[in-house]
Amino acid sequence: MFTINKQIPLIAGLLLSSFFSYSQHHVKPQNVILIIADDIGYGDLSCYGAKAVHTPHIDQVTRKGLVFSDAHTTASTCTPSRYSIFTGEYNWRKKGTGIATGDAGMVISPEQFTMADMFRQAGYTTGAIGKWHLGLGDQQGDQNWNGFITPGPVDIGFDYSFLMAATGDRVPCVWVENQRVANHDASAPIAVSYKEPFPGEPLGKDRPELLTKLKPSPNHGHNQAIVNGISRIGYMKGGGKALWQDEYIADTIAARATGFIKKHTKEPFFLYVGTNDIHVPRYPHRRFAGKSGMGFRGDAILQFDWTVGEIIRTLKENGLFDNTLLVISSDNGPVIDDGYQDGAEALLGDHKPWGPLHTRGGKYSNFEGGTRVPFIVSWPAHVKSGTSGALISQVDLLASFAALVGQKQLPAQVTDSQDQLKALLGTSNTGRQYIIESSTSLSVSDGEWKYIAPNASPAFYELTRTQSGNASVDQLYHLKTDLAETRNLADEKPEKVAALKTLLLKEKEK
Ligand code: NG6
Ligand code: CA
């Protein structure tokens, strides 16, 4: 009896400790999928209040998921924003993180620690599919598009990659699978240049009659190499059967993403899916034609929603949906005319891509419209459905995912990523104390107040019709009562300006 009695606390202790170690080490999702849309605005999805466009597949996710109202990118364009997601470091700390050309070298160097490295360490198979725009190879222009391109995603932690090097509107217009051009056509060797045209290759600016699918907007550029009846930024030669068809880009990305899921049903995986939707040139598949009533831009939103639906369906068919942590977000705010005459402006109607809250700005802007983005988390086994007002930044995904999968120690170079797992999983509504956003200026926001540092750039970008948030003076907005950032209170609240400036300075000195 004595021994048994003595053992009871021991057994109970063992049970308890194994329970706690179980909860610490086993409450992690089998898979993590990060879907980053391109240029989808805060108001472009029905779960964020859009009425004119319906995104039922994403609605289906939100019925069991968490919808964030105060989630941000670190920058208002793609390359810097994705740089921060993958490295956990603010883009503005590192040179060369601006919008990359299609022949840019790797923006993240192989020595850097990334989200993919972290997942790999935690035993997850890692994949990157779709839009990359973070450079390939060592330096600008040195890629061998007809052979092996190195360094590449494998050197920053991705076991598998199937990517468009930059954007739909930049050459080369080919898929790069595991650092080789997919379907490479030996009869049409590929050459790419961002300096000089290739003699004999037609250019959009000279041969408008060849632009059968979309025409560039005046003064935006996008009038260089012609591929598939659309002129692009940059010069390109060759490609042959490897060239992508714009109307199948979404189908290709969805097929690769669902293929990756089906191939890895038995092991944990991390999958990054960067959609091309709804970046320009918007040329969705004809099955979406006219379905939104808003032309190509609206139809591309439906195509994005369909892509999410394909991923969900595949997860469900393979019994993976409940135990997959899925994050859906965007890389920057919305833009209407970003370089092609696709009717987006004329057909917009009452739709407000910036959101039901009339957020000002959009892609390229320092205002909230540039960086406040849709952000949805789904993990039905552990995350309750609802909404969250927690202030979060995409730069926090790395440390939060690391906490999720038990990778406690992150290298010091992961300067800016905070463990916001509780906010991400909806067990806390607090989030960050403040976030830093970047465009032409740096801004700091604590969720209630936002400060934008002065700069000399124009207040309005004529080409994209963007209110840029640039001003030669300090700007201070009370977001809680003025989300549209219309009343600059800097003169009335000098102490608040000083406090936020101090935060910014502290961050810069880190
Ligand atoms: C801009 C392009 C724009 C788009 C953007 C990158 C011009 C005038 N505009 O420079 O069309 O490609 O770069 O978009 O060239 S992003 O979403 O990938 O950041
Ligand atoms: Ca973008």
Image (tube, rainbow, N blue to C red):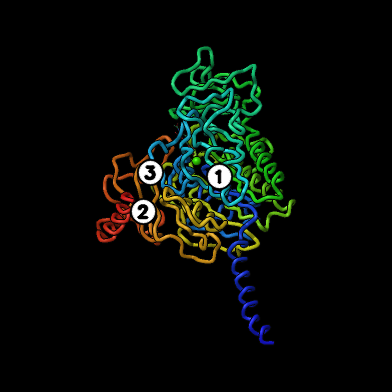
Residue 211 image position (x, y, % from top left): 57, 23
Q: Left of 381 or right of it: where is 75?
A: left
Q: Is residue 150 above or below residue 383?
A: above
- Residue at screen point 54% across, 20% down: 191
Q: CA distance from mark 3 to mark 1?
A: 22 Å
Residue closest to the eye, 51 or 405: 405
At label 3, the amino acid type is: Trp
Q: CA distance from mark 2 to mark 3?
A: 13 Å
At label 1, the amino acid type is: Ala
Circle 3 residues within 10 Å: few <14, some 14–19, many ≥20: many
**Figure quadrant of residue 470:** top left
Question: From the viewer's perspective, is the residue at label 2 or at label 3 nearer?
Answer: 3
Circle 1 residues within 10 Å: few <14, some 14–19, many ≥20: many
Q: Which residue is mark 1?
A: 37
Residue 34 image position (x, y, % from top left): 58, 49
Q: Is residue 239 above or below residue 129?
A: above
Q: CA distance from mark 1 to mark 2?
A: 24 Å
Sequence-wise, the earlier of marks 1 and 2 is 1
At label 2, the amino acid type is: Val
Asked whether residue 63 is in view, the answer is: no
Sequence-wise, the earlier of marks 2 and 3 is 3
> Is there CB contact under 8 Å for labels 2 and 3?
no
Residue 57 image position (x, y, % from top left): 65, 51
Q: Which residue is mark 2?
A: 444
Residue closest to the eye, 102 or 247: 102
**Figure quadrant of residue 278:** top right
Asked whether residue 311 is in view, the answer is: yes
Question: From the viewer's perspective, is the residue at label 3 or at label 1 nearer?
Answer: 3
- Residue at screen point 61% across, 34% down: 178
Q: Which residue is mark 3?
A: 92
Residue that protrudes farthest toward the bottom in the picture: 1
Residue that protrudes farthest toward the top in the picture: 200
